[in-house]
Amino acid sequence: MEGTGLLPTSIVMPDLKINPERLHADFVELAHIGATPEGGINRLALSANDIHARAWFADKVESAGLAVRDDDAGNLSGVLYSAEPGAKTLLLGSHLDSVPNGGQYDGSVGILCALECLRTLREADLDLPINVEVIDFTDDEGCWKSLFGCRALTGALAQEDLSAINYGEGSFRAALMQVGIDPRAIWRASRAPQSICGYLEVHIEQGPRLHREGVNIGVVSGIVGRTTHRVTFFGQAGHSGTTDMYKRRDALRGAALFIVRAHDLVRERYGDGIFNCGDVTVEPGMFNVIPSKACLTVEYRHVSEKLMAEMETAITSLAHQCAATYGLAVETEEIAHMPAASLAAGMIQLLEGVCDDLDLSHKRLVSYSGHAPQILADFTDTGMIFIPSVNGISHHPDEYTDWPDVVNGANVLLQAILRLAHRN
Ligand SMILES: [Zn+2]
């Protein structure tokens, strides 16, 4: 470590390592909570399984001699407090919730690696000048409201954000109240930025790059922005048999042309961009009636806000061209936008330095999936550590990461904590 002459040597511990067996035992126990027959996980936010996992986590925190902390948005933490009064807090986060039948690694490894780091630090009996807090964010996966818990922590949630959100039969407000979260008190979960000295998260890549290239660690440089649009094509209903094949105004035909051409456009002109259409509804929705209306929900992702805006404009103009081809009308409407985020340059360099010292190969990566750092990047110095996902599979029971890769992620996190403790 550089420049240690004036710093307390008690927290320079380049050889300190986490306990891989203890971390693995935790992983196995946690994977049983909400386990599905296919080998996946069902821990939808605020569900009984999510609450069960959180109770398990709180027990682990307590039995490790750490303090349990929770807030008015239901975020649940374990804290290793510094003896220094007024110490700032380094947050280490991720999530215990999952998508339906999701994988065992997504979110869980981030929480477990952080918990294991705190236990290791406590056992080493270091006088850290900062508090270190592992935090499980409520509804990170967006079963109700994407990245709900970390939005609340940064004070970025408004009461309107809780309205008109439903999942199945239930409303978000009712689901919050059922687990003891008062929707009117969520604002109290916000923290003062000056009380926080940074945020770090270990997460599986959820993509194939690290695994394919045999790289140990991905240092995340940025997270893509996401925009969701509703694109509705309007044509004219008619008898499927008797209407002239050359004179029909089929809304679905225009929509289909649009989907194919939008994919081509993004692939040809925006190499790093993403287009997806995963939701189509057709009216009147009868096999023997020409569709009069086709409503698509489409999503764009790009790490550059400028190119994202260009891509949106190009795709909207494409929708108009496709509609005109078949004599249709089209309307487009933005329904959500999450800006792209750049992670802190200082954190990127720090993580790369840790990897070098641990002899781990590393590579800077853009994240194509949304994560808490996207919200936290504007709030505090934020860094993110990716570990390889075998074949890039995620949000699926086959999600898998080789155990030594999880251990590497935890050890990078541990050394990053020690370096940040030096700085503060
Ligand atoms: Zn995740």
Image (cartoon, rainbow, N blue to C red):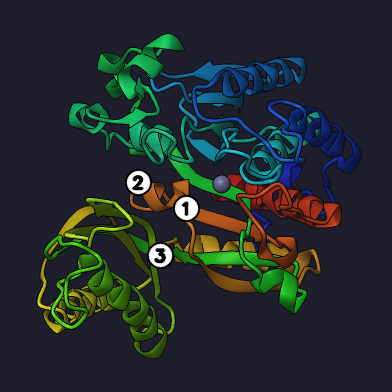
Q: Which mark is residue 224?
A: 3
Residue 78 vs residue 175, the one in the foreground? 175
Please say if 278 is above or below 12: below
Disc 3 and disc 1 in contact, CB within 8 angstroms: no
Does ligand 1 reach within 8 Å of label 2's beta carbon? Answer: no
- Marks 3 and 1 sit apart, C-alpha to C-alpha, by 15 Å
Does ligand 1 reach within 8 Å of label 1's beta carbon? Answer: no
Amino acid on which disc 1 is placed: Thr
Q: Which mark is residue 379?
A: 2
**Could you tell whether 107 is left or right of 285 in the image?**
right
- Marks 2 and 1 sit apart, C-alpha to C-alpha, by 8 Å
Please say if 121 is above or below 237: above
Please say if 250 is above or below 84: below
Quadrant of the image occupied by residue 19:
top right
Residue 111, image x, y percentages: 65, 37
Q: Earlier in the sequence, mark 3 or mark 1?
A: 3
Q: Does residue 180 appear anywhere in the picture? A: no
Q: Which residue is mark 1?
A: 382
Residue 172 vs residue 197, the one in the foreground? 172
**Residue at horizontal 45 percent and vertical 21 percent from the top:** 74
Please say if 341 is above or below 83: below
**Could you tell whether 165 is left or right of 212 in the image?**
left
Residue 392 vs residue 258, the one in the foreground? 258
Amino acid on which disc 2 is placed: Phe
Amino acid on which disc 3 is placed: Val
Q: Does residue 293 appear anywhere in the picture? A: yes
**Residue at horizontal 75 percent and vertical 41 percent from the top:** 38
Residue 67, image x, y percentages: 62, 17
